[in-house]
Image: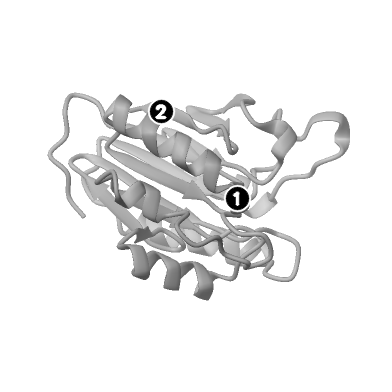
């Protein structure tokens, strides 16, 4: 997947749609209007793997480029099958590059039926980032959020130590997560990395 980019890349980052087709249509229209280069779904696009038919088709019908990772509501195998069906880039343990912007990720979470260990999350991110060569900017996508950030508000939600360790090691320009619905819109800074929590309202990010 290669794009001829403008000065900056526009990404529409979305999380936790949970099968909301009405919202998906709104986001597809927004992405078309704003001329985004890539739509990334940061997991939990189903409700316990009950997939809503047409959820990804609304984006493809607009001619939009898609990438995705699994959340804690879908297995990596299920998410990869959906990615193949709709021609989306699968970023769980992999990377893609658009011009000089590289994107990589690890879905699932550090809990739940499809949960991964902290070591597995770290290794997926480290492996995918190690494959990146010559990127001007890097964007990391996860479903779970990194530990020790503002997303851990009120002491109710605890992030992933493995993801935080990967961010400290890799130092991407931007790290995007979803999972915690109440944290949508929260931003933080870890070293040089801008941390952004996204949700079903979506957020356009320029890099």
Residue 74 against residue 14 in the figure, above or below:
below
Residue pushed farthest left?
A: 4
Residue 62 picture location, percent across and down = 28, 43
Q: Which is more toward the observer, 45 or 26? A: 26
Residue at image coords 42%, 28%: 204
Element marked by disc 1: helix
Left or right for 44, reference 203: right
Element marked by disc 2: strand
Residue at image coords 39%, 49%: 58
Residue 37 against residue 84 in the figure, above or below:
above
**Total numbered labels:** 2
Q: Is residue 171 among the parts visible in the rendering?
A: no
Q: Which is more toward the observer, 52 or 66? A: 52
What label sits on residue 163 in the rendered view?
1
Q: Distance between the residues labelled 1 and 2?
A: 21 Å
Q: Mark 2 points at which residue?
A: 205
Q: Which is more toward the observer, 60 or 191? A: 60
| Structural crowding at the residue carrying mark 1, measured as other residues with C-alpha within 10 Å and reported as few (<14), some (14–19) or many (≥20) | many
Q: Is residue 178 among the parts visible in the rendering?
A: yes
Q: Quadrant of the N terminus?
A: bottom left
């Amino acid at each position: 997947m290669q794009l001829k980019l403008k000065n900056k890349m526009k990404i529409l980052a979305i999380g936790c749609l949970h099968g909301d087709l009405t919202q998906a249509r709104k986001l597809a229209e927004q992405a078309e209007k704003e001329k985004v280069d890539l739509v990334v779904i940061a997991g939990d696009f189903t409700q316990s793997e009950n997939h809503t038919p047409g959820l990804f088709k609304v984006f493809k019908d607009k001619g939009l480029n898609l990438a995705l990772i699994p959340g804690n509501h879908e297995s990596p195998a299920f998410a990869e099958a959906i990615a193949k069906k709709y021609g989306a880039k699968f970023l769980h343990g992999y990377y893609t590059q658009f011009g000089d912007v590289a994107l990589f990720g690890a879905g699932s979470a550090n809990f739940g039926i499809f949960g991964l260990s902290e070591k597995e999350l770290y290794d997926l991110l480290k492996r995918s980032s190690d494959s990146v060569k010559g990127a001007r900017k890097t964007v990391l996508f996860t479903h779970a959020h990194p530990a020790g950030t503002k997303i851990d508000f009120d002491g109710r939600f605890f992030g992933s130590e493995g993801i935080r360790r990967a961010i400290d090691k890799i130092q991407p320009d931007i790290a995007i997560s979803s999972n915690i619905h109440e944290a949508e819109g929260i931003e933080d800074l870890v070293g040089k990395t801008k941390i952004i929590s996204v949700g079903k309202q979506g957020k356009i990010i320029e890099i």
